[in-house]
Amino acid sequence: MNVLSIDQSTSATTAYLFSERDEPQLIYSKTHRQIYPQASWVEHDPIEILNNIKSAVAAGKLAGAELVGLANQGESCLAWDTKTKQPLSRIIVWQDTRTSRTCQLLAERSHAPFVQNRCGLRLSPYFSATKLAWCYQNAENADQLLTEGRLRLGTTDAFFRDVLTDKCETDVATASRTSLMNLDSCRWDEDLCDIFSVPLAALPEIGDCNGELGEIDGLRLSSSIVDQQAALYGHGCRLRGETKITFGTGAFALTLLGPQKPDTSTAAVPTVAWQKQGEPVQYALEGGVFTAASAVNWAKDAALIHDFSQLETFSKPSLIEQGIAFVPALSGLGCPHWNEDAKAAWLGLSLSTSRQDLAQAVCEGVALRVAEILDEIETKCPVSSVVKIDGGLTKSSGFCQFLADVLQRTVELADFSEQTSLGVALLAQETTGETINLNIPTRHFTPTHNHAQSRKAFSKARTLVENWAVPEI
């Protein structure tokens, strides 16, 4: 059957049509506005994105789609009225750190150990819970709507599914990103909801990542999952330790663990990978660099480069070996440091440093941060010797080789880069008993240089940046 796979990402809504025999066909792609009302706030317009999804569905129907699958941004969330299907807030994007102070107050009240043990997640504005509490506190007539059973608080997928299928539901992988789901039971947790001041009654139902999930304009919704977990599935990771890294707006590494609940005492993020209809939950460990392609785009906007093709090859020796480092903390530092107050910085500049050098240092900083993440994941689960990669930054062979050298692992790059879309399509197609057989060529980058000293230099740079994070003025 023909599957319409919609990837509703941080930057755009993209749709591919997958069939059993033909190559994937791009049938829709449209960016949406990035809204920055003030420092540390990042928002999207839910109606703008909803209309983009509707346009993608319409294009899919014209192209012969029979099933539809949907990938979502993960932690991004909002409030809405389930009766009128109208949003009560903008989407608060996962990069948004407006609730940093709330997380600090919760930590001061000694809630951090309980929260991490129960849901696996650290107290961080990255996750949805404090954002949902903010939506609840700031939505007009929220308490009255809650009393009337109309208030809904949830991740973006739940809003889109409520509007498009008239079923207010989310999937277990997405729910695991909120800090409100018990990682053991995979159900909303009353204690967590109380701690974060999020009314449980306003949350969507939690279900599987594929199955009979409703109908969108005549098409069966057959899969719904977080974009990063979808990419893990698209890469074919099915065995413990198999790992993928997606270099999109942020860079996110996921390592599959299997059906056993992970140890929550880790700076990596224990999360649900997926749960297919009628099967056990599969878990993973995750870590993210919050600004990857967005950091490169920022560098381009700052006129450091005119086009990404300028970064196709890297100068040698690397910039970090020349003493120039960039710490990509434009939205704080995630795993394993969890410092949302950290700011980005270049170190080691001189009069001879060029714009091209600065841009390459940005890319190197993303790779060096990913290496820190895999080090942390490795403390809980051996990471595969071959790491699969996708996303915009992987278009640069210079970046891919530098990454392999920094990780001291072979990295595998598929010619078809839309692994999130592929994962969504595979999950949807499996509900029919069929599969999608694609012969996708891959390229491999093997380590040719050891960056052990570069890793140490970057660690020093990151420490300096963190010490600058909250200057007393």
Image (cartoon, helix red, strand yellow):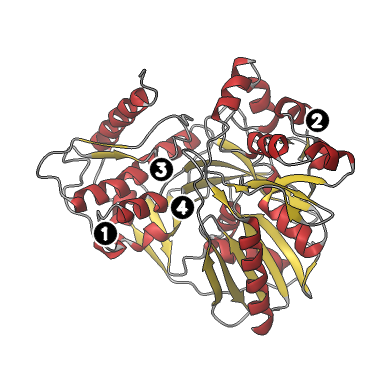
Q: Foreground residue, 435 or 94?
A: 94
Sequence-first tag of 3 and 2 = 2
| Left or right relative to 116: residue 243 | left
Q: Looking at the image, which residue sits at the far top? A: 109
- Cα separation, mark 2 vs mark 1, equals 49 Å
State the separation of the CA atoms marked 3 and 2. 34 Å
Mark linked to residue 370: 3
Quadrant in the rendering for residue 431 = bottom right
* Distance (Cα) linking label 3 and label 1: 19 Å
Q: Amino acid at mark 2?
A: Glu
Q: Is residue 187 above or below residue 16?
A: above
Mark 2: few, some, or many residues within 10 Å (few <14, many ≥20)?
some
Tell me which numbered mark, 3 or 1, is placed earlier along the sequence.
1
Look at mark 4 in the image and give the residue it sits on: 249
- In this rendered view, identify the residue nearer to me: 285 or 350: 350
Q: Disc 1 versus disc 4: distance between alpha carbons?
A: 17 Å
N-terminal of the pair, mark 1 or mark 4, is: 4
Hey, what amino acid is under mark 3? Answer: Val
Looking at marks 3 and 4 on the same chain, the residue that comes earlier in the sequence is marked by 4
- Residue 274 in the image, given as x and y percentages of width and height: 68, 51
Name the residue tied to disc 2.
190
Q: Are marks 1 and 4 in contact (CB under 8 Å)?
A: no
Mark closest to the chain's N terminus, 2 or 1: 2
- Relative to 22, say whether 417 is above or below: above
Question: Alpha carbon of mark 3 to alpha carbon of mark 4: how far?
Answer: 14 Å
Alpha carbon distance from label 2 to label 4: 33 Å
Identify residue for label 1.
311
